[in-house]
Image (cartoon, grey):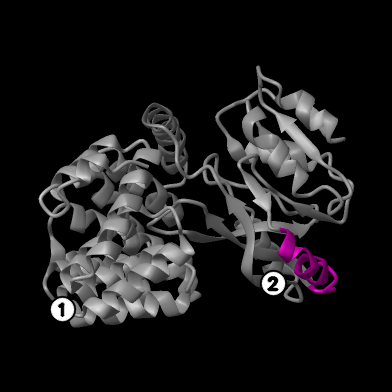
Amino acid sequence: MIVKNEAANLQRCLASVVGVVDDMIVVDTGSTDQTVTIAQDFGAHVYTYDWCNDFAAARNYALQYVQSDWILVLDADECLVSAIIPQLRTAIQQPDTLAVTLLRYEVGAQQSPYSLLSRLFRNHPQISFVRPYHELIDDSVVAIQTQEPRWQVGYIPEVAIEHSGYQVDAIAAQNKYQRACRIMTAALAQNPQDAYLCSKLGALYVEMGQVQQGLDLLHRGLKLRPPEPSILYELYYHLGHTYARCGQLQPALQQYQQAVAQNLPDLLKIGAYNNWANLLKQQGQLAEACQLYRQMVAIQPDLAIGHYNLGLTLREMGDLQGAIAAYQQALQKQPDYADAYQNLGVALLKQGNLPASRQAFEKAIALHLHHHNGAAAERLKQGIADLFPDSSSLHP
């Protein structure tokens, strides 16, 4: 691990690997909180490193202290899923496996909740991280495979890592964006043929509001013709997102179709399926959108937003019973889903079930307040005032 001021997260992360790993290597890049003390309390070997705006360099500094045959890399806001441990043990016993690709779940992410990462690999002297931001070992793994074709890369399709650091406050996000932009711009200047960097930096420009710069970089990445389906997927996905953001729906649809066509596990393409369906719904192509949402929930039945969006579409199609069932599925997967309760209330109201409708609205109001969304709670209370004359008494 490399860390800095991660006292709030580190304990949960290290607790997830206690009894699983033989050693913990923590490289600290300048913490001023209790990060180092917490790591040492878990028995970790802690080393200090002078930060130089290069994540790969910091990762490689940590690698030199590893004594074990295999290496698992985690960030402080991640944790290892306990159910996956037997599969990890089996994977590292395969004699020709050089690295294992792990599935990470982004807790709270609505767009792309799953990603593949090369985080488990042999302690091979030629494996190292490259790129100062969004650092990876993949390039060195490919180079080793070219020299020694017997080496294989394994893959475990179940979630191995949970990442809870997806949501950050606006100021922290802005600072992170600016830092990432500086680092990746310098890296791309040194490696102008890197389609992966074009994808990451292009998407970052769009997030920062520099849309045309982002589009130019994303198209530049495509022109470099990267052979990796994962990079192509990201380029097409981000182009779809950007065109949709600009109101250019037809180009956006085409990009999402290209993204979904990439040879990757469907779980990794959930974001493109969802956004493609959203655009179809927006254009009134409800049956087509419904089909894509059904594909989403078939790929990942536990993803609440898939059931929720299916419910919205079915309601527009006049299928109230189907919509109610979809909202209920969303709430089964995510019980604190305020919008699902609110739309469930609307569907039940249209069906004429006033008691159940009121109960759903009450729950939605309580959850909006719980999530510090007082404006949404107040709007809902005002909106149902005529339906339920005593609605002013609604409270969590």
Q: Is residue 41 above or below residue 255?
A: above
What is the distance, in whole Å, between disc 2 and disc 1 at their CAs?
46 Å
Which region of the structure is painted magenta? Answer: 82-96
Q: Main secondary structure of the magenta part?
A: helix
Where does residue 382 sit, x and y in percent of width and height? 15, 43
Quadrant housing the C terminus = top left
Element class at badge 2: strand
The residue located at (30%, 55%) in the rendering is 339
Q: Is residue 369 visible?
A: yes
The residue located at (72%, 64%) in the rendering is 83
Q: Nearer the viewer, residue 167 or 96?
A: 167
Report the amino acid beneath label 1: Gly
Where does residue 70 sit, x and y in percent of width and height? 82, 56
Q: Is residue 84 magenta?
A: yes
- The quarter of the picture where residue 277 lies is bottom left
**193 with respect to 163 (left or right):** left
Residue on which disc 1 sits: 318
- The quarter of the picture where residue 93 lies is bottom right
The residue located at (29%, 67%) in the rendering is 309
Quick one: label 2, few (<14), some, or many (20+) residues within 10 Å?
Answer: some
Report the amino acid beneath label 2: Gly
Quick one: label 1, few (<14), some, or many (20+) residues within 10 Å?
Answer: few
Residue on which disc 2 sits: 154
Q: Which mark is residue 94?
A: none
Q: Is residue 321 above or below residue 98?
A: below
Element class at badge 1: loop
